[in-house]
Amino acid sequence: MNDLLLRTLRGQDTERRPLWIMRQAGRYLPEYRALRERFSFEELCARPDLATEVTLMPLERFPLDAAIVFADIMSPIGALGIDVEFAPGPVINKPLRSAAAIQALPVPDQEEIAPTVLETIRSVKNELADRVPVLGFSGGPWTLAAYLVQGRGGRDFPALRALAADEPGVLADLLERLTDLSVSYLRGQVEAGVDAVQIFETWSGVLSFADWSALVKPHLQNLLEQIGELGVPSILFMQNAPHLLGGMISLPADGFSVDWRVDLSGLRQALGPQKVLQGNLDPAVLLAGPERTSRAARRLLQGVPREGHIVNLGHGILPQTPIESVEALIEAVHDEAQEDRRAVASAGTGG
Ligand code: 1CP
């Protein structure tokens, strides 16, 4: 298997930086858009044959170093008896706004949680035959709560923050339930064959450092400790949260994925070589075309030492991204390894 990603997450040196792209299986691919003309997003997720096809689409086109299973962070939420619609992001028509609604949530057994996603994982593992590792994922507890309480994605989640201020105990109950749900779901994913997992805590940045540390961080700590017991490495992604970095990197994840607002080079210098960092090109740079992308990628590689770095974007790839920009990013990463090999070879021959 191409195990660049897994070796990097274990703290081992690799001959080339691993590279995968958040949201790599999605709307920037013409073949995905063609399939979406025939099937809704929900249908794609519910059909393991189609979800497998979409998972593999980016790997057919590009030499990426991991597959990420095609599903959504809301995929396990159906097991709580809550209906989720997609328009195009998740929408909950009856948001959870009271202690009674939260206390009434069922605690599903592992087999009840997103069984079609687990079937997709088994089928992807089978099709890939160990070509590259398969990443499983779950939403972070706060990000899942954001959709359940606010009802949809947005900029600052006022209903969620009001619940945090008004009834922190009720919020804690919800976050605990969502952490347990994620652990069961991820255990199912590991049993189905995923090689590593990423936690998407996309909306963590809306809280202050003090509130996040008190209200959210203990649940992430608990989640990551339990993932550690599942025996696969974990990556924690937080978005729009440079003010939470100090707390983030003290959590027990194997890798830390940060967005483009963070100076990755400076962060590496501050942390030393031990922590694995993932990121963090601005996805918007890819919209400016392959030359700009190539330049920005080379600058990133020059600024951040190879050891312990997983190349990725700072957030999901945008639907309007030209394919040529993705190719330019991949080429920059592959070229660096080739230049390293040439340098070693010429040093060896005295040239
Ligand atoms: O075709 C379509 O219209 C559906 C668009 C789409 C896709 C392709 C949605 C709706 N979800 C997905 C798949 C998805 N979502 C994947 C698997 C594919 C891959 O990564 O290659 C993953 C990992 C996610 C994760 C996800 N969903 C996150 C965390 C990552 C991030 O980008 O921050 C979040 C916040 C969501 C919610 C969501 N689902 C869909 C959209 C458009 C959104 C985000 C915005 C919103 O809330 O409106």
Image (cartoon, helix red, strand yellow):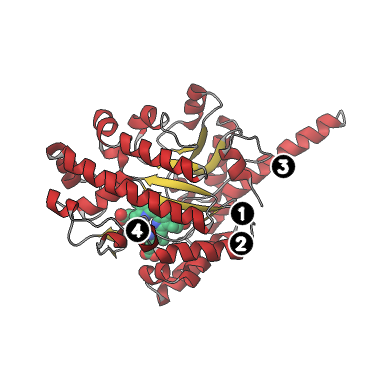
- For marks 3 and 4, the one nearer the N-term is 4
**Which residue occupies 54% across, 49% down?**
20
Q: Distance between the Cα atoms at labels 4 and 2?
A: 29 Å
Query: How far, Cα to Cα, is label 4 from label 1?
Result: 30 Å
Q: Disc 1 versus disc 3: distance between alpha carbons? A: 20 Å
- Is residue 330 visible to the viewer in this orientation of the structure? yes
Q: Amino acid under label 2?
A: Leu
Q: Which amino acid is tagged 1?
A: Val
What residue is shown with label 1?
Answer: 132
**Residue at point 47%, 27% (across, down):** 267
**Amino acid at dot 4:** Asp
Residue 256 in the image: state x and y as whole percent: 46, 37
Whether residues under marks 4 and 1 lie with C-beta atoms below 8 angstroms apart, the answer is: no
Q: Does the residue at mark 3 contact the one at mark 4 (Cβ under 8 Å)?
A: no
Q: Position of residue 94 (x, y in %)?
A: 17, 60
Nearer the observer, 80 or 23? 80
Check disc 3 and report the residue beneath it.
338
Which residue is identified by label 4? 109
Q: Nearer the viewer, residue 255 or 268?
A: 255
* Residue 318 appearing in the image: no
